[in-house]
Image (spheres, grey):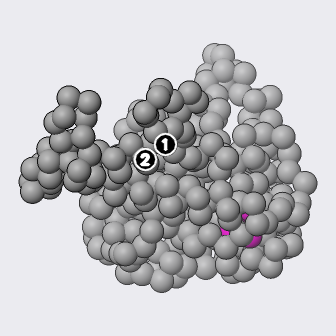
Amino acid sequence: MKEIYDAGQLSIVHGVGYPNPNRSHFRSTEIWQTASDSSRFEKYGWLGRYFDNACKGSDPTIGVTVGRQMPQAFSGPRPIGVSLENPESYRLAASDSPEEGESGSSMDFIRKVNEPEAETNSGASIGSVAGRVSSKLSPLDYLERTALDAQLSSDKILSISRKASNQAAYPASQLANSLKLVARLIGGGLSTRVYYVSQGGFDTHANQSGTHERLLRDLGGALNAFHSDLKAQGNQERVLIMTFSEFGRRLAQNANGGTDHGAAAPMFIIGPKVKAGLLGGAPSLAPNDLLNGDPKFTTDFRRIYAGVLQNWLKTNPEPILGRRFEPLSVV
């Protein structure tokens, strides 16, 4: 990270959080993912609202999550985006040993179900049943469209991931492997606006020192390799990297050599076009300035979202964030 900072391509935003902080992992993650207030529950994610407001008509690969589960940040009125761990396994798999008369492909099965003249062994027409249901917005029609989208996007991602090779040495970790894949998809030309990867393990309630050191080394090494990979591709200028977490840690160490859930944390923003250096006010560590033992937040995280939406993704942040937040100048 220091190498990126010295190159003038790293911004560190001090003391990021929100009013009335919640120390529950689930609830605070939900607040960050939906850009909502701690007193209000929001159904859709801030990136899902971005896709819905600014990327209508886009194919599912407009947002790609590397992992098993789509983040709540991607949820929206018209869900879009794909989640995968490996392009080779992101497929509609054929049966290993289809029975006689069965198709080995999920797609073939769905098509057969919707064929007007398809007959079952008993002579009943599957197609006629599907036809009657489709007059009431058939679930089968929806299933077929969804499956076709999945088939097309899986073919596209697999093809594109094979077009480019990584041009930097990455450390051996899950985060690094995720960023290696993202670098290949960017290098191959996938028309994605947002990639989402994650790194766990920072809930250091005990024995924090060694764990924290290892995690930060992994984070810094993976991001530096990814940054170098994009530069070698000639794509570095097109990419903005932003990190976030649901909360920071408390100021005081607990009895187990760790720290508990806090209220403010730094965010890292990386790229050739970032406003490099230290942004925002550093939280005071004076005892009288603490919030129940925690450093107080000094920058609302939604100001950073607003700055990224307005100055990088080139869209109006207000309908996405639900109200006006003064965009933080991060680009």
* Residue at which label 1 appears: 105
Q: Total number of numbered labels?
A: 2
Query: Which image quadrant for residue 124?
Result: top left
Query: Which image quadrant for residue 22?
Result: top left
Q: Secondary structure at mark 1?
A: loop
Residue 241 appears in view: yes
Q: Position of residue 11 (x, y in %)?
A: 68, 68
- Of residues 78 and 120, the one nearer the viewer is 120
Q: Position of residue 237 (x, y in %)?
A: 72, 80
Q: Secondary structure at mark 2?
A: helix
Q: Residue at x 71, y 54 (%)?
A: 181
Amino acid type shown at disc 1: Ser
Q: Taken as a whole, is the magenta stretch helix, strand or loop?
A: helix
Amino acid type shown at disc 2: Asp
Q: Are marks 1 and 2 in contact (CB under 8 Å)?
A: yes
Locate the C terminus and report the quarter of the image it occupies.
bottom right
- How crowded pointer 2 is (Cα within 10 Å; few <14, some 14-19, many 20+) is rated as few
Locate the N terminus and report the quarter of the image it occupies.
bottom right
Up-down relation of residue 86 to residue 256 (above or below): below
Q: Which residues are magenta?
A: 183-187
Q: Is residue 105 left or right of residue 11?
A: left
* Residue at which label 2 appears: 108
Q: Position of residue 119 (x, y in %)?
A: 24, 40
Q: Is residue 185 magenta?
A: yes
- Of residues 169 and 202, the one nearer the viewer is 169
